[in-house]
Structure formats: C-alpha cells, structure tokens
Image (spheres, rainbow, N blue to C red):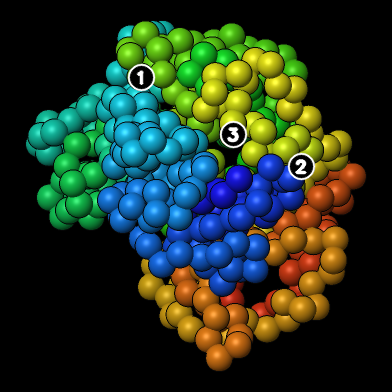
Amino acid sequence: MNVLVVGGGGREHAICWKLAQSPKVSTLYCAPGNAGIAQLAQCVDIAATDVEAMVIWAREHAIDFVVVAPDDPLALGMVDAMEAAGLRAFGPRKNAAIIEASKAFSKELMAKYHIPTAKYRTFTDEAQALDYIDAQGAPIVVKADGLALGKGVIVAATVEEAKQAVRDMMEGGRFGASGSTVVIEECMTGPEVTVLAFADGKTVKPMISSQDHKRAFDGNLGPNTGGMGAFCPSPNYTPDIAQRCMEEIFRPTMAAMQAEGRPFKGVIYFGLMLTEEGPKVVEYNARFGDPETQPLLSMLETDLMEIFQACVDGTLDELEIRWKEGAACCLVLASGGYPLSYEKGHVIYGLEEVPQWATVFHAGTRKKDGAFVTAGGRVLGVTAVGTDLKDAVAKAYEAAKPIHWKDMHYRRDIGQVWVD
C-alpha cells in the first residue's frame, strides 16, 4: 500500500518508523515530515493543516491509506475530507475530534454520562470567571477551551495566579480563539497516568500505560511544555486500576460518543488522575500523545498497519494486540529556552555515535549543508527499551550522552522517582 502520514514531529517519526516495518506498506510518505523522517519516508512539503492541498495530493498520488496524526488537522476535519474524496483515513472525524478540540464539550460529555472527572464550570464572561475563582480559592486549574499546543492548562497555586491566567486567555488573547472560553476546575491530587487506546467506533483496546513529564525543569518545575520525556508502563497503573478504568471510563466514553452520534475511530488519549476516590479523567486527546508515542510504539509487537486498518474497518475486536515485556523510556532533548523563546539552526553533533540499541526520533530538525540542525523547541527523542523501567531509563540517558548542540537542554529526572 501507498501510505501517507500527516504531521512532522517526534510522534510522526515514531509512527513512520513503525509503519516502515510493516510488510503491508510498500511506499511511505509524510507531510510535511522532518529531517529524521526523511530517512524512512518521502517527505512532502504540505502543511499539516492544509486540508485541501493534502487531499488533492493524496488523490493525485494514488494514496491507499492516510494516517492523520496531529490534533489541528483532525479538528479541521481532514479525515472527513479524505473520506469524501474516496480515501481511507485513520483518525477521528471532526465531530469526534471535538473531544479534544473543546474542553467544554468533553467536560459536558463526562457530566452527562457520569464519567468521573474534576468538578468544573465553563465561562465565556471574564468577570464571572474571576468571581468564581474568588469563591473557590486555590489551588485551582484554568484551561483554555480549544487547542493550545499542549500549553493551555495552568495549575494555579494562588488565586492571583489563576486570575492572571484567565486575563491572559480571555482579555490578552494568549491562545487566540482557543482561550475565549475557559474551563475552571478543581485541582485533583494523586499520581497522573496516561492510557492511549485504539478505537474503532465500538471497541476500545488500551495500550500499555505511560507517564509524561510536562514541566520544563527537573523536579516538575518551570512552565508546561509539550512533554520533556515519557516512559511506559507506569508502575502506578495496577491491574485493579486498569479494570476500573475500563469499566468506569474507557467503555463509557466510547458508548457516550456513540450515543451522541460521534463514534470515535482512531487513537483516544485518556489523561488520568489516580485520586483517593478512584481514577478520574484529567483530559481527553483525540490522537497519539507526544512523546508517549515514542516509547509505546517501541514496545508494540503487532503490525501497526494491521491495527490502523482494523480501526477503520470496525474489526478491532477480532485483533490481538501484543506488547513486549519490559519497559521503554523517551528522553526529549530540547532547545535552550524552550518552551519560551529559543534559537534554531544549531548543528546537532554526535548522532552517529548513538548506540544501535537506542532509537533517536526527530521532532524539530532539518538538513542544512548535509548536517542535521535544530528547527524547533523539542528537537530529538532518544528512546530505549529495557528489561525494566530502571534499565530503560539508564539506557535512554546513556544513549543521549554523545548528542550535543549549542544550548541543548534536557531534564535529568525522567522516570527517576521509580528508579532511585
């Protein structure tokens, strides 16, 4: 099959890497891709959000299957547009992708169908939002309703910090239209776990659990980022909790979306908080997480193309999905200053010295004069599989040692709480 992957980050590199191993895939394309992806697939210079151009190109190049990976094109309806053009596409349609594109929608869905989550209120009026914060006190969570590159959630320790977040979103336009509506919710406590799951509209099959590290600096300090590293599985996610999540969250979410006339096909991301009352939903995403995808797909044994086809065809219940034993860890190497201001164009050294047992997924790179150079905030995801979490973490850090560029930054404590 001729397969097109839409996107150009570390997640898409991991998807292309796994699809390239499938005997079902004859030619692999990625739009727009990056310098690392170009080693596996033919990169196409079309923006991931350019729905019309992507559909035209896919039809002209006899693409048999399209994988829409990022949130923005899903929210814009790229899967719908591909299907309307007679193309098979993996990912939720626009009316199902709203589960991530609108936090207000997802909270209302959970309230209506009694899916456990934090208490909340939604606001379109700034003054009312500020009054609510005064009444509730802190800590409290402020969320931009729409997509905000993973940075639209502020866990405010003080009332003033929460109010400033509201002002920045609603008055200051920090996230554009995405912040014109805000969701304010109670601050839940407990370990956070991520569970991604394959879905075909009816059946949901969870992947192994994972844990992301969102803050920029060690000790979970600094601003939120798109993710500075991830590992899988999470030791917090016991078989008992997994069973509870399936019965109280995963299946009810699928049934709720079906009941709303929005059947979900693709990958659904459950961000969970393991509270004293039990697991609760922090957020939904409508696609693979980044960087969780990198360690997860490193652990996957089943042909990814087979899974994608089963999700589209509605036959996921017939497929056994197999995973490796052990654990995996992804360490994100970022540009100095990320997620705020940072420089691009620095030459990346040492990639050829990375051990063969590790995989380096490119997130923000390009080629210049034959060398890889930085082209984003998150630049590389060094990923390793180990016999257990301690081994996987040690291997990821060992593999990253030869890599360097000007002002390179990474966290030194990914997975460390489980290793020490």
Q: Which residue is mark 2?
A: 299
Residue 266 makes an appearance in the image: yes
**First of labels 2, 3 by sequence position:** 2
Residue 270's place in the image compared with 257, above or below, is below
Q: Secondary structure at mark 2?
A: helix
* Image location (x, y in percent) of residue 231: 70, 46
Point 48% across, 84% down: residue: 345
Point 77% across, 78% down: residue: 352
Closest to the camera, between mark 1 and mark 2, is 1
| Residue at mark 1 to residue at mark 2: CA–CA distance | 30 Å
Of 383 and 280, which appears nearest the observer?
383
Q: Secondary structure at mark 3?
A: helix
| Residue at mark 1 to residue at mark 3: CA–CA distance | 19 Å
Of 208 and 33, which appears nearest the observer?
33
Of 125 and 9, which appears nearest the observer?
9
**First of labels 1, 2 by sequence position:** 1
Crowd rating for badge 1 (residues with CA inside 10 Å; few <14, some 14–19, many 20+):
many
Tell me where residue 210 sits by quadrant.
Answer: top right
* Image location (x, y in percent) of residue 193: 60, 33
